[in-house]
């Protein structure tokens, strides 16, 4: 996946060198070509730090391209000004949105069938955790592979979010507040 992002970045860079573009047009070009490749399928990379490092460096290079920064200049300020999340937070955003949509019935039913709220478990109803919006995380047979399975990782992401987020009912409101929380987490 990193190769796809890098090739899109190279194409964008060559277009920028051959044509003089305004920052707004360049931002639109980079969003269409590079960030879509970066976000495509990145939810499968939960807990794979080596691959995330490659994607993070591609994101840094993209931000430098938009602002015309040099290769070794610090990029955090540029990322903050663009209001872009770091790669782990982008993955968290995507995964949390998928879980939210599954819980609210806007994704296919087979995805929602894999989710079980803690309040639906008879033995937990009387516990304090029985009154939360948490989901039951399945136990994995294999610690290394099973924990990285999409739904096990997705449910851990969902349970790590504040209750004020997971109790929202509007997708646009959820996405807006989730991005704010993750942005603060990225750059605090």
Image (cartoon, rainbow, N blue to C red):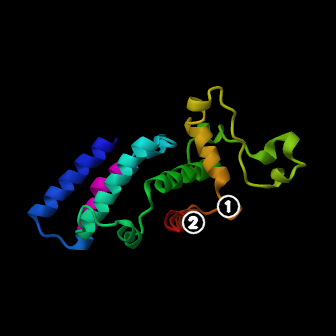
State the image coordinates of residue 100 (x, y, percent, origin top left).
60, 53
Judged by its main secondary structure, the magenta piece is helix
Left or right: 186, with 133 as reference point? left
Tell which residue pokes out farthest to the top in this image.
Answer: 141
Residue located 37% across and 49% down the image: 55
Q: Nearer the viewer, residue 123 or 67?
A: 67
Q: Nearer the viewer, residue 160 or 31?
A: 160
- Secondary-structure class at tag 1: loop
Residue located 30% across and 48% down the image: 5
| Residue 77 falls in image quadrant | bottom left
Left or right: 109, with 50 as reference point? right
Residue located 23% across and 47% down the image: 7
State the image coordinates of residue 128 (x, y, percent, origin top left).
85, 53
From the image, tell me which residue sits under label 1.
162
Badge number at residue 142: none
Kindly check if marks 2 and 1 are in contact, taking CB atoms under 8 A apart as contact: yes
Badge number at residue 181: 2
Q: Is residue 180 above or below residue 130?
A: below
Marks counted in the figure total 2
Is residue 60 among the parts visible in the rendering?
yes
Range drawn in magenta:
26-38
Q: Nearer the viewer, residue 5 or 54?
A: 54
Residue located 18% across and 52% down the image: 11
Disc 2/disc 1 C-alpha distance (Å): 9 Å
Is residue 104 among the parts visible in the rendering?
no
Dot 2 or dot 1, earlier in sequence: 1
State the image coordinates of residue 130 (x, y, percent, origin top left).
83, 50
34 within the magenta span:
yes
State the image coordinates of residue 26 (x, y, percent, origin top left).
23, 66
């Amino acid at each position: 996946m990193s190769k796809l992002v890098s090739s899109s970045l190279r194409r964008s860079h060559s277009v920028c060198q051959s044509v003089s573009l305004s920052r707004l047009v360049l931002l639109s070009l980079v969003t269409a070509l590079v960030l879509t490749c970066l976000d495509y399928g990145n939810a499968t990379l939960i807990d794979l730090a080596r691959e995330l490092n490659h994607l993070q460096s591609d994101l840094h290079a993209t931000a430098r391209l938009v602002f015309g920064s040099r290769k070794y200049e610090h990029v955090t300020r540029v990322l903050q000004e663009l209001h872009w999340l770091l790669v782990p937070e982008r993955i968290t955003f995507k995964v949390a949105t998928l879980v939210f949509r599954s819980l609210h019935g806007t994704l296919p039913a087979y995805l929602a069938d894999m989710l079980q709220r803690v309040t639906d478990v008879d033995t937990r109803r009387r516990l304090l955790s029985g009154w939360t919006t948490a989901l039951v995380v399945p136990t994995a047979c294999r610690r290394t592979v099973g924990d990285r399975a999409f739904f096990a990782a997705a449910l851990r992401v969902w349970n790590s979010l504040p209750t004020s987020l997971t109790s929202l009912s509007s997708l646009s409101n959820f996405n807006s507040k989730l991005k704010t929380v993750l942005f603060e987490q990225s750059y605090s």
